[in-house]
Amino acid sequence: MRAGALLAAATLALLAACAGGGDSTVTLSFRPEIPESTNDLNTAAILDATVATIRARAVAYGIDVPEIEAGTDNTITVTATGIDAQTAAQLLGTQAVLAFKRPLLTVEGIVACTTAEGEAFGVLPENVNPDDASGSPARCFSRDKIGDPVWAPAIALAINEELTAAAVQGNGWAARDDALVARFTPAGATTLEALTEEIAGYPLAIFLDENLIAAPRVNRAITNGEAFIAGIDKAAARLRAAQLNAGPLPVKLSLLSSASPAT
């Protein structure tokens, strides 16, 4: 009976480990999209920079990457521990080029919008809101039309300065519950204050790889150099903070394969 009990306990422990009780490990293979005209020396530099950025993201996210290497065929193979395959592919394989944008306005303060068919229309700022149906953080809703805002570079017109990714401090992104926080450099804080004073009442768009990921409405001028971007769940905020603190990949990556060892 004692031996049987020990065997049953060992079996239960093994099942628990296979169900996720231990740290998961995944191996991913990426192919960098390197232009054909790139010479061997520049290709090697791109691969080195890509490997360094992937490793920095893993450190920022808090996972272990025991193996990462670029092969002779220019593919990059990564083994990561403590993360599932889907999250690892998004965290490590997204290029993550950041851009801020402001809505294009008429002289009357109307937000310029377009329908999916390309028809132009305009709405008041209070009619630019998140859309559960499409998942978009900002959609234009008029009486008879639905569309997307027209976005323009986030230039503070009063000082003729654009708010860019470089305006955020090094390691200036932080995850909070249901929010992502950005801390700006002194120069960036000046631009942020001037910009948000101009667009108070309107959304400030945040794009990653030309995809709109957030469009918080600016309630008032931000004077403390810290932007609080609400509406991003904790898991997504943690992933975005790690990507943005490590910086963008030098080129886009295509995911070739991902695999987890069998338990």
Image (tube, rainbow, N blue to C red):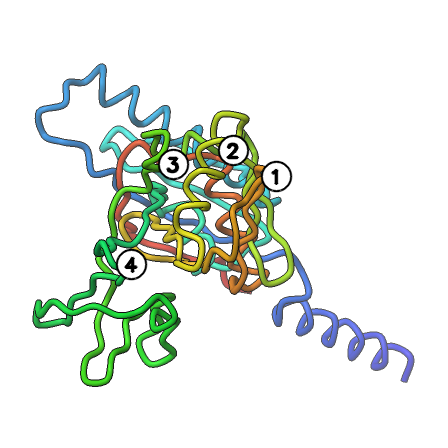
Q: For mark 3, does the 10 Å Cα neighbourhood hold few (<14), some (14 to 19), or many (20 or more) residues?
A: many
Q: Earlier in the sequence, mark 4 or mark 1?
A: 4
Disc assigned to residue 50: none
Which element carries disc 2, helix, strand or loop? helix
Establish if 124 lies above or below 8: above
Disc assigned to residue 109: 4
The residue beneath circle 3 is 163
Quadrant of residue 158 within the rendered picture: top left
Q: Amino acid at mark 3?
A: Leu
Camera-nearest residue between 263 and 116? 116
- Verify CB contact (< 8 Å) between mark 1 and mark 2: yes
> Which residue is rendered at x = 40% and y = 46% of the image?
198
The residue beneath circle 2 is 189
Q: Residue furthest front?
A: 108
Q: Amino acid at mark 2?
A: Ala
> Which residue is rendered at x = 59% and y = 61% of the image?
234
Which element carries disc 3, helix, strand or loop? loop
Camera-nearest residue between 145 and 55? 145
Whether residue 30 can be seen here: yes
Q: Earlier in the sequence, mark 3 or mark 4?
A: 4
Q: Nearer the viewer, mark 4 or mark 1?
A: 4
Q: For mark 1, does the 10 Å Cα neighbourhood hold few (<14), some (14 to 19), or many (20 or more) residues?
A: few
Disc assigned to residue 224: 1
Camera-nearest residue between 176 and 185? 185
